Amino acid sequence: MDKKHRFIISGGGTGGHIYPAISIANELKERFPNGEFLFVGAQDKMEMQKVPQAGYEIKGLWISGIQRKLTLQNLAFPFKLLSSLWKSYRIIKRFKPDAVIGTGGFASGAVLKVASMLGIPTLIQEQNSYPGITNKLLAKQAKSICVAYEGMEKFFPKENLHLTGNPVRQDLLNVDDKRLQGITYFELNADKRTLLILGGSLGARRINELIEKELDVILQLGIQVVWQCGKLYYEKYKHLNEVENVHVLAFIDRMDFVYAAADFIISRSGASSISELCIVGKPTILIPSPNVTEDHQTKNALALADKKAAILLKESELDDKFRVTFADLISNDTLQEDLSKRIHKKALPNATNQIVDEIERLIGVRQ
C-alpha cells in the first residue's frame, strides 16, 4: 500500500460517540500505519480532551444541538450550522480525506454532509437501537451504515446497512478467565456473590439513591457490592466504604476485572454499556436514564428486555418493584442462566474489525 491514506473521523458530545470513534481510528491505524488521521468535534465538548489523550489531532466546530425549549442557544443555531459547514468545507479541502467516518453528534453531521456533497465516501456508525436525528438526516447520502441492532431498515436504506455491533474494549472478550484476578484486584470475598452497579462515567443520581436506600437489604441477602457511583457523587457516598462488603468507587479503571468478578449487574443502558454487557453475559437489571435525547436508553433496554435477555426497570418503578425484582433474580438460578445465555447471544464482538473492513471496501482497498 504505497498510497498514504487519510481519514477524517467525527463523533462526540458524549462518551458513547467518542469511544467508538477512537476504537475505529485505532484499528485503521493498525492497518494503515502510514495513514493520516484527523478528528472533528464540537469545540466545547469532551472530545476536545479525550481525542488528544488518545493521541489524535482534533479540530473543533462551533456547533451544538437544538434545545427543546426556546433559548438564545436555539436562536444561534442557524449561525452555528453555517459556521460549521463552512469550517468543515475548509478542513476537508485542506486535508483531502479518502473517507469520512461519523459516529454521531452534531459535529459529525456538518462534516459528513459536506463530505457527501464533495463526493467523498462516508460511513455512519449508529450505536443505538433508535438513531439520533443527525444520523437519520445523513443516511440517504452515506455510502455505508454500520448498526448494532437488527431491524434498522425502519430508519435507514436497507441496501447500505451492515449489522456490525458497537466497538468495545478487546480486553472484555475473555472475562470468564479473569474471575480470580478480578476478585483479588477489588479485594472481594471469593465465597460471596457480587453485585456490580454501573451508573455511567459521571454516575447516575437516581441509581445511587436507590442503592443507598436498599444497601442493607442487599447485604442481608449475602451479596457484596462494587458500586461505581461516579465522580460527581463520590464525596457523598465514599463513607460507605467503611461498611463491610461494600466497595464504592468514583470510576473503575479495570472494567475487564470488575465484569469478571460480578455475578449480577445493575446498569444504565447507554449503547456502549449495552454492547459490553452482551459480551460479558451476566444477569443484568437495566435502569435507563430518562433524561437522554430521544429516550435512547429506554429503547436500547427494550431491545434486550423484549427478548428476555435483561430485566428492565424504569426509574419511576424503582420504589415499588426493585426489592422484589432483585430478590427474585438472586434466588432463581434458572432465571440467571436464561438471562446470561440470551444476553450473550446478542453479543457482536468483532464490531471494530467489521466496521474497518467496510471502510476498506469504501476506499477500494478490499473487495
Image (spheres, rainbow, N blue to C red):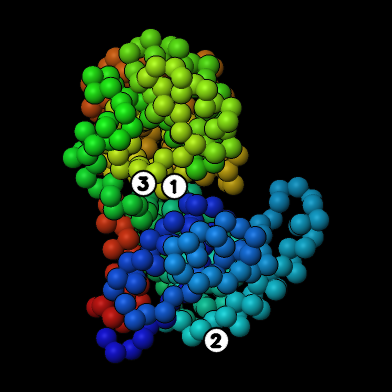
Label 2, on which residue?
94
Quarter in which the C terminus is drawn? bottom left
Rendering coords of residue 293 (x, y %): 59, 47
**Residue sitting at x 32%, y 61%:** 352
Quarter in which the N terminus is drawn? bottom left
Q: CA distance from mark 2 to mark 1?
A: 33 Å
Give the SS element for disc 2. helix
Q: Quadrant of residue 264?
A: top left
Q: Residues within 10 Å of mark 1 (few under 14, many from 20)?
A: many
- Is 47 on the left-hand or right-hand side of 33? right
Q: Residues within 10 Å of mark 3 (few under 14, many from 20)?
A: many
- Tell me, for residue 275, which label it has, or none: 3
Q: Quadrant of residue 12?
A: bottom right
Q: Are marks 1 and 3 in contact (CB under 8 Å)?
A: yes
Q: CA distance from mark 1 to mark 3?
A: 6 Å
Q: Amino acid at mark 1?
A: Ala
Q: Please state the total of marks drawn on the protein image.
A: 3
Label 1, on which residue?
271
Q: Nearer the viewer, mark 2 or mark 3?
A: 2
The answer to whether one can see residue 324 in this image is no
Q: CA distance from mark 2 to mark 3?
A: 36 Å
**Residue sitting at x 46%, y 23%:** 241
Rendering coords of residue 86 (x, y %): 66, 79
**Residue sitting at x 23%, y 19%:** 191
Q: Amino acid at mark 3?
A: Ser
Rendering coords of residue 158 (x, y %): 39, 62
